[in-house]
Image (cartoon, rainbow, N blue to C red):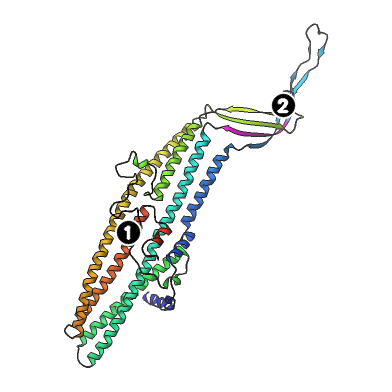
Amino acid sequence: MSVLIVFHAAGVADAQTSKAPCLDEVLQQAILHDREVEIAGHKAEAAAIERRKAVESYLPRIGLESSFRVIDEAIGTDPFILPPPADMVRMPSITLQEKRTFRAGIEVSQLLFSGFEVPRKIRAADHGHMAAQFLTEAKKQHLVLSVAGLYDSLSLTEQALALMDREHERLAAEKEKAMKAFSEGLIPYYDLARLDTAINEIYSRRIEIRGKRHLAALRLEQVSGIDRDRFFGDVPELAVIEMPPGIDPARPPASGSGGGERSSGMHAAPVNGDPPDVKALYEARQAAGYLYQAERSAYLPKVVAFYRHELYEDDLSVLEPARAGGVLLRWDLFTGLSRSREVQQANIEQQIARSRLADARLDAAMGREQASVNEAVARQQIEAADANLKSVALSLELASERYDAGLAPVSEFLEARADYQRARLSRMEAVYQQRRAAMDSLYTHGMLSIETVLNIGKKL
């Protein structure tokens, strides 16, 4: 496994002279490449179609109807004699309806009043569309968080690998000097062996770091579709993220979602501090409420305008018009309890939406506080790493002077160099963790867009 990694790293050594794709390009390609974002976008389109369907309930309906009917006998009158003084006149039988009839006609109808059912379904569709849009934004922000973390991992491995390469060169130079000193009998073989051990340890760390870099490039290729070899170019170094205005690292902004506001704050309208998934659940709760009201409104009568034109008039009875129009009132008084069950189901969906919103806001409030604490801790870790790096740098300087003057053994010099390398790596790791905590905080505040990521700290 290590042979494959070393071979691949050697194969892309020439590519390192070029720059790797910038974070902006990677994020854009990842959003275009991600199936979850694509599905969420399709759901938003479906929600928009649902709204158009509700609005189009008021459009006229045109239907063609034809039928062939057979009755037991023709409908008509028997012969009769007119009453006096015209009693000498005998009237023949009159056929009102033939035994076999064919009907064909066009009917146009238009809903005039739906009992408030359609307007409420339109409002529900509006909120459903907004919920789908917020869910799409939530998918994008989660993807940005994931891709930015992978890109930072790649940058961290590049920095660590560059550090190991420089250290390997320094130790190799020290070994050349030590070999000359050993050939002249100035140092024991033990010192030379310690240098070989230190060089082998650096080489082993380089293999490990290259493997991590290779895996980060593979993962970035998977999420963005960009060829992995492009990620072996120069990547900008990690920098501390400065939180944008409006986010207090010590205290997240109040957003009406405190833990003790379960009866009112949990259902208040969303604010800027709410992440998009909470806003989506709020819109879903609004949609469920309007759907419940729409189902209840279905009990009210409906008013429909209609016009019918008979296309085949030969079989019409003398009492049936060829053309007729007017307004009808339709009122379903009993639907076999189906309407009641639909109202009950809509009410249950409304209660479920309320519970999901309340839990999501509690989780969001806790997430903001946790991300804020993690970001503050990460900053303190950076300060501690800076202080430690300053201390070990001074120790290394003193140890190097003693070693060059022949006053200290090589073990003391190598130990000081190892401490310095660990301090450098710890500082890089602290910056990486601070970036993760800062982006988590932006995500919990619903602010982790591509523009925000590119405008904070160092633009990667």
Farthest residue, direction bottom: 184
Q: Would you say residue 111 sits in the magenta stretch?
A: yes
Circle 2 or circle 1, nearest the eye: 1
Q: Which quadrant, please, contains the C terminus?
A: bottom left
Which is nearer the eye, 136 or 459? Answer: 459
Give the residue type that dot 2 points to: Pro
Magenta-tinted stretch: 102-112
List the residue tagged with mark 2. Answer: 321
List the residue tagged with mark 1. Answer: 437
Query: Most prominent secondary structure in the magenta stretch?
Result: strand
Residue at 78 percent across and 18 percent down: it is 93
Q: In the rendered view, does 192 fall on the left or right side of 313?
A: left
x%, y% of residue 240?
32, 64
Give the residue type that dot 1 points to: Ala
Residue at 39 percent across and 45 percent down: it is 270
x%, y% of residue 66?
69, 34
